[in-house]
Amino acid sequence: MKNWMITGLFLLAASGLNAQAISGFSPEAAKKQRQLEATFDESLKKENLDAWMQRMAAEPHWVGTDYGAENARWMKEQFESWGYDARIDTYQVLFPYPRVRLLEMTAPERYTATLEAVAVEGDPYTAQGEALLPSYNAFSTDGDVEAELVFVNYGVPSDYEELEKLGIDVRGKIVIAKYYGSWRGIKPKLAAEKGAIGCIIYSDPEDDGYYQGDVYPEGAFKNSTGVQRGSVMDMPLYPGDVLTPGYGATEDADRLDRQEAPTITKIPVLPISYADAEPLLRALQGPVAQASWRGALPLTYHIGPGPARVRLKLEFEWSLQPAHNVIATLKGSEFPDQWVIRGNHHDAWVHGASDPVSGMVALMEEARAVGQLAKKGNRPKRTLVYCAWDAEEPGLIGSTEWVEDHLPELREKAVAYVNTDGNGRGFLGVGGSHSLQTMVSEVAGDVPDPQTDVSVKERRIAAQLTRGSDADFELSALGSGSDYTPFIQHAGIASLNLGFGGESSGGEYHTIYDTYPHYTRFKDPGFQYGVALAKTAGRIVLRLANAEVLPFDFKPWQATVSGYLDEVMETADKLRKEVEQHNKLVARNAYTLAADPTKPMPKPEIKAAVPYLDFSPLQNAVASLKDRVEEVSKLDTASLSKAQKERLNQLLMHAEQQLTSPEGLPRRSWYKHQIYAPGFYTGYGVKTLPGVREAIEQKNWEEAESQIEKLAGTLNGMAEYLRKIQEVQP
Ligand SMILES: [Zn+2]
């Protein structure tokens, strides 16, 4: 009764929503599509997600395991039973298995790290002993090193600047860095560049442990023995199989020598728990770490170097393992050569109930319901390709090899790629190509949030409002971290990555605690948000598949690119002011006079001034794009003939490719996209307009100028391409 008013308002709002148009559909077709979506929703069963998770996450299943192969075989059978043509595409990929892991402190006292997470009561999966993959960082090099230890906070570029101010050099040392603050692979990469000979990464309880909440099994968070596994492959250079850059790792492919593979780390690196990190950190002396570096362990955080000395010895078994991608196709009734591709990975570090099985089972339930629609006469107009990727965890390997192996066909036929991964309770998050923002926003407005009386879009906007942002429903930009990377950044296929989260935090990520009991207690009890994910991704897929005119809208895209340009220009200005201020303080000797005279510090040096860059080629390109996009949005698609619509759709589905360049980004030619890339020194974190932005951040002015020219050329090319779209007239 108390909710009467709210419910009444909601019904009005909901009926208003349903009357709304769907981009790319005539009013008649939109009505039919909504009926189809209602039938689709009704057939989704949370019981399937539950049963399939119990099956797929029953045993550890990293790439190369029997259980991983069994999961692939079983999924193929499921897809076939739902009416799909399914096959398993297998690649032979290099995968390191840890044989020797030794970490000991040799001075000032002895401590040997246990490197062992404990089994917990009430979760039998954690007690599978030998079957659990030992904790390690995949694509660490082999090594046996001993040296003094230095604490480097998160081990990101700004941390090394702070160390430099203190006169602390990590050359010849072993560094210990906290997880978080960057993608993990950046830590050993940067440490090696700075001359360190080994790298330890640990989870501090402040970021990932008791400081966050009760630890497993009482709560969801990381207990003192939990260790986050994960890849440290240099993915910002290129992801996928380290031995076959840019081409498929087929049986008979040419392979690099392992010693030559540039994406394997230069120094050994090992992840440890906070129980194992504590004695090491306690034994450090030297300066006390500044407040922002300290974690939540009961000790005073010192930086070192030493007197703690550690020995790190790692040996891996390097062998080719079969990566099994399941590819299930439902041929389109009208446009069989236009593909909507939908994927999630199926391999896990251990059981992976959350990462990736929660996303995988939602994808499967979506595919089952779509198959059922097709059997009842509602076959999608375009071809659907459902993919279950293997070997995502060690470095997006299964998807990357598949994309590289099928590149020309994908660039010809792909309409879009829609990715999911682990999923949990909370808010809808979507990243991707901004030309798809309008379509995704419409979909989000039509999916009800399972635990409130509003749409998932309204709920997400409410969350943004409470954080002080009055932005509408917007897509984030894609960096890296899941299987969309080869599609968007290498192939130039418009892509999306989506999932729910934010009310399901925990410390299980990549540990032995990511299990069915943990998931169903803390992540998404009842699989309500798994079903919401199937509804959201399923709608995206069905609308892309059935639209008369593909729902690409370049207005939000242009506005977003324009915003990125403003950011980049601001970055250059900010950098200039910082350098001016720094030089002023150096000239006044202020740093030295303000420092503690009893703690000697190297005298800071004058920095080279930041020049004014000429951004006008980009400003002009963005302005002409704006005019062009205006014109395109006036296009009267309703009065186009069938042939004209076909021509328009061909242009629309290939538009994203205009944003790639064959030579790619400086020093990493695998990354072709000129708008989105993972940062060279942030890893998963995105860098938009990466060529220009990173040149500025690295203070490489010559390169910044040439990248401005290059990007302006790409954007002007896009404006020309939009003119072709505009010219499709009745
Ligand atoms: Zn994942």
Image (cartoon, rainbow, N blue to C red):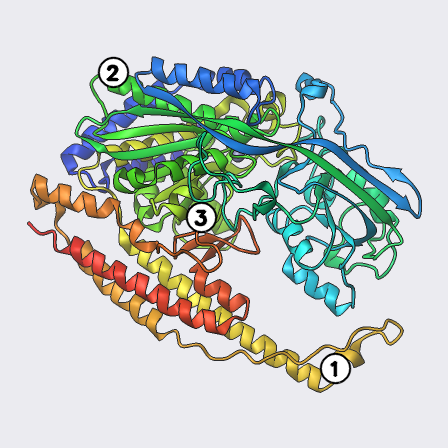
- Mark 3, secondary structure of its residue: loop
Q: Residue at x 56, y 18 (%)?
A: 66
User: In 3D space, how far apart are the residues under numbered discs 1 and 3 (Cα atoms)?
Assistant: 42 Å
User: In 3D space, how far apart are the residues under numbered discs 2 and 3 (Cα atoms)?
Assistant: 35 Å
Residue 298 in view of the camera: no
Residue 618 in view of the camera: yes
Q: Earlier in the sequence, mark 2 or mark 1?
A: 2
Q: Position of residue 496 (x, y in %)?
A: 39, 42
Q: Position of residue 153 (x, y in %)?
A: 72, 54
Q: Position of residue 558 (x, y in %)?
A: 31, 59
Amino acid tagged 3: Leu
Q: Are marks 1 and 3 in contact (CB under 8 Å)?
A: no
Residue closest to the eye, 455 or 310: 310
Which residue ends up furthest to the right in the rendered image? 109
Residue closest to the eye, 609 or 24: 609
User: In 3D space, how far apart are the residues under numbered discs 2 and 1 (Cα atoms)?
Assistant: 77 Å
Q: Earlier in the sequence, mark 1 or mark 3?
A: 3
| Residue 405 falls left or right of residue 594 | left
Q: Residue at x 31, y 62 (%)?
A: 715
| Residue 583 falls left or right of residue 637 | right
Residue where numbered disc 1 is placed: 590
Dot 3 surroundings within 10 Å: few (below 14), some, or many (20 or more)?
Answer: many
Asked whether mark 1 lies closer than 8 Å to ligand 1, one says no
Dot 2 surroundings within 10 Å: few (below 14), some, or many (20 or more)?
Answer: few
